[in-house]
Every structure is written in structure tokens, then in C-alpha cells.
Image (cartoon, rainbow, N blue to C red):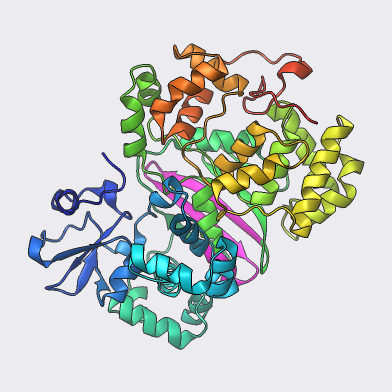
Amino acid sequence: MSLPLTDFDERYRAIDARDTRFDGQFVTAVRSTGIYCRPSCPARTPKRENVTFYATSAAAHEAGYRACKRCLPEAAPGSPAWDVRGDVVARAMRLIGTGVVEREGVSGLANRLGYSSRHLTRLLVAELGAGPLALARAHRAHTARMLLVGTDLPVADVAFSAGFASIRQCNDTIREVFGLTPTALRARRRMPSDAVPGAIDLVLPYRGPLDAVGIFDWMAARALPGVEEASATSFARHLRLAGGPAWFEVRQERADRLHLRVRVTQLGDLSPVVATARRLFDLDADPDAIDGALRAHPEIAPLVARTPGIRVPGAADPHEMLIRAMVGQQITVVAARTALSTLAEALGERTETGLLFPTMTAIAERGAEVLRGPAARIRAITGAAAALADGSLRLTVGDDGAEQRAALLAMPGIGPWTADYVRMRVLGDPDVLLPGDVAMRAGAVAAGLPGEPRTLSAWAERAAPWRSYLTAHLWRAAPVRPTRRVTRADRSPASNTVPDHQEKIS
């Protein structure tokens, strides 16, 4: 399966087959009804001459179409194209999903991307059929629908949680997009039986299959006490957001469903929390496309068969991710977790319910008092924190991948492994290989692939653009070895017992 579909005939075959794999990748607008649907809509397939395909629901809104009440296209998983692609349109879509337009306006979005507002609007309209305001409006409409259907929040709270400036604006948008009043949408709500007062419960849609066991295990191995809590079927953490402290939990209650429970200080932070949870669990991935491409190579086909739907975990906070990667550069996962737990305990901010990871300012000013290890490594970590705190180093989900990598490599103590690992986790880049990774190379040898970095890199070119997922499979394939004392020459952080990369600290 190619990704994304661009040919009319391919897309029409997808909607005729009601193929759920393409939900969220495009929408189908039907001129005879004035409605747009997701590809898998169970309604009768419209005639070809009545169909127009749009890349986003925002473009369909702008063209005058309303969302289908039967298939609820706004509830589909997000498009994987925004992670596969690294261009300005993809970066803009990732930032819009985090609520940048609501917080900073179109000018703030454009400034983050290095364009004028007018030129950015032209780029988005030319490719997606909608500008940043329309795209943000569609995102707000989706959030409002999700809250109206999935929670018992008052309509006023729904409006401001979704990022609308007023209740009237929310009501008008809901009517225009869905052809229903907020009250009519609310009639569809399905409250969970174990709803907790003060918490917001939502369903997180995704494309199956999902290697839930693997991703929850990954989180559990790295969870910092007080900041995070993990089990075989759940992961929760405290997070610092624009409106104040927040908490969320992702849990698996059924084999085919993930639930998100959220508490926020300000309702406007809800949408960014949802986006963070989706990135953290890589829920907008297209596992059929990824597995199908990797399965084509006989050497790794058994790995894909063993773990279908493998995910590459994202990052809850880009700045925190860099510090965690740097702390773990030359030590095992267990040792890194201990060091990071000590750092969080000493410098983190306590809330009524938990612990927030330390601010970059706190690490820059007091990290040397808490961190242990080579002086050069401690200076590198506190220096990176200082650069993040004063803005001289910028690290966001909307960065250009090559520019982010170059900026990180320019920092003392950051080498290719750390820069690429951060790119994989923060940007969700699906095509990152870590050839210096000891655990990954061990997994490669176990799978019958070359173990030498240069030879492995050359072989892995055939797995593009899914080398991050190849890396995840090779990590999983690495033989489990008993814990032993790790020498300076082979320390690294990916496996729980033996580190997975070598990176010199200068």
C-alpha cells in the first residue's frame, strides 16, 4: 500500500471497499448531499461524478460541506503524512495540533516556521485547500465534538477547552461543521462507567494493529517515580503546560481501545494534552503500510510477524527528552532512570498530586549539585538546559529535522546518536536509524543482518522511509543478556541491561 494515496482511482477504490486503513488520510465530499465522510463510511458508495477528495476536513469545510453524522470523520485518527513528511506543511500541521494558533495566533505559527503569515497561508491553501485559521478552526471543532460526545462538561467549558474565543463562536462552528447543535451532539455522548469527578475521559482512536504490550513495557522501564507511573496496561504522568500543572493517563481497557483520562489546571490545555498523548504512543502511525513495507524483506519479515503494529514512542516534552537522552548517554536504562529520578526528586516542582520534571532553568542552575558522573558530561547537560532556558537552543515538535539535528550537534556533549534519537522521539521522524546503537546491532545480528554500523546502514536503506520502525524491531530482537558491570567503552541507554550506543562526551 502506498502512502498517501493521491490518485483519484486509488482513493475511489478505497472508499468503495470501505477501507479503514485510510481513515484520517483524506475525506470524501459528496456534491449531491453536501456531506463529507471518512473513507470507511458504511453509507452507499457515491457515484464517481459526485465525489471530490480533500486532504483535510478543513478543506471540505471551506468548500461548504458538512461532516457526516454517521461515520463522524472528525473522530478518525490523524494523518500519518505529517510525521512521514518533514516539509513546512507537515511541520505546520504538527504545530496546529498542539494549539499554537490558539495560543500565539497565525503570526506565532508563521514565526516558528520562519515564514511570513501571508506566505504560510499561501502554502497551506495551495496544498491543503485551507489556511492556518481554517485548519485551526477544524481542529477546534474536532476537539469540541470529542468533548460533547465523550464528557459531561458544560457547553461553556467545552467551548473554551477547544480553544474557541466565545460560546457563540463554538455554537456557530458546531452547527456549520456538523449540521447539529451542541445539544444534539451531546445526545450522542457515552459516559464511561468508571468516570472520575474532575477528570475528563476520552477515547483515543488509532489504526490497528497496535503493539500495546511493547509500548507500555517501554514506558514502564523508563518511568520516573512521582513524575510517571506505569503498568502492563497503563501509563500516567504529570506535565507542565501553559495553563499550569496537568496530569494524564493512557490505559488499555479493551484489546481494541485506548482511553485517555486528563486533569488540567486550565481547560484550554486539554487539546495540547490529547496531542501529546497521541504523539507519545505514536497513534497516528499507519501500521499496515509500515508492516507491509518491512515485511517485504525476508531478513526482517519474521520480526514483523512476531510484533505487528510496533510503535516508536514519542516525547511528552521536547526539552525534557533532550535531558533524558543526555543523562542516559553512557549508562544503562536502569542507571539512567535512577539518575533522572534523583534529579526530579531534588529539583522538580511538587504539586498536590505529584511531581513535575525540573524546569530547564532549575537544571541549568543546580543540576551540577545533583548529577553524578564525568564533569564534562554534567557541564554538557547543564549547558544544554541553559540554552533551552534562554532560547538560544530551540527544540519543538515543529522543527525542521535537518536544522534541529545541526543545532543539537553544535552543542558540546551531543553527538550523532543523541541528535538522531531526539529527532526520532520529538519529531516522530519515521526514518531514523541509529547505527552506533549496541543493542540495535545485537538485534541485527540475531536477525541475520550485518552488525557493523556502516554495513548495517547500507542494508537499512532499503527500509526507508521506515527505518525508525526497523530500529524498534531490532531493539526488540536483541538477545536478553544478564545484567553485568558495564564498561565505559560500551555504555548506552536503549536496553534495560546492556546499553545500546557509544557516544563520546567532549
Viewport quadrant of the C terminus: top right
Q: Position of residue 463 (x, y in %)?
A: 40, 29
Q: Which x, y percent locates residue 472? A: 50, 30
Q: Residue at x 29, y 53 (%)?
A: 23
Q: Quadrant of residue 139?
A: bottom left
Q: From the viewer's perspective, tell me whether residue 161 is left or right of residue 409.
A: left
> Is residue 247 a member of the stretch shown in magenta?
yes
Q: Which residues are magenta?
A: 246-271
Residue 286 position (above or below residue 464): below
Q: In the image, what residue occupies the spot 32% across and 38% down?
A: 289
Residue 152, placed above or below residue 358: below
**Count of numbered tags:** 0
Residue drawn 78% across the image and 59% down it: 390
Q: Please identify the residue farthest to the right as the structure is shown.
A: 369
Please identify the quarter of the rendering in which residue 332 is found. Answer: top right
Q: Is residue 476 visible?
A: yes
Q: Is residue 458 left or right of residue 35?
A: right
For image coordinates 82% across by 34% down, the residue present is: 377
Q: Is residue 181 left or right of residue 375?
A: left
Q: Is residue 194 visible?
A: no
- Quadrant housing residue 111: bottom right
Q: In the rendered view, tell whether residue 267 sits above or below residue 282.
A: below
Dominant SS of magenta comes to: strand
Please tell me which residue lies in front, 129 or 260: 129
Q: Where does residue 152 sit, x and y in percent of width and height?
A: 46, 72
Q: Position of residue 257 (x, y in %)?
A: 40, 48
Q: Quadrant of the N terminus?
A: top left
Asked whether 105 falls inside the magenta stretch, the response is no
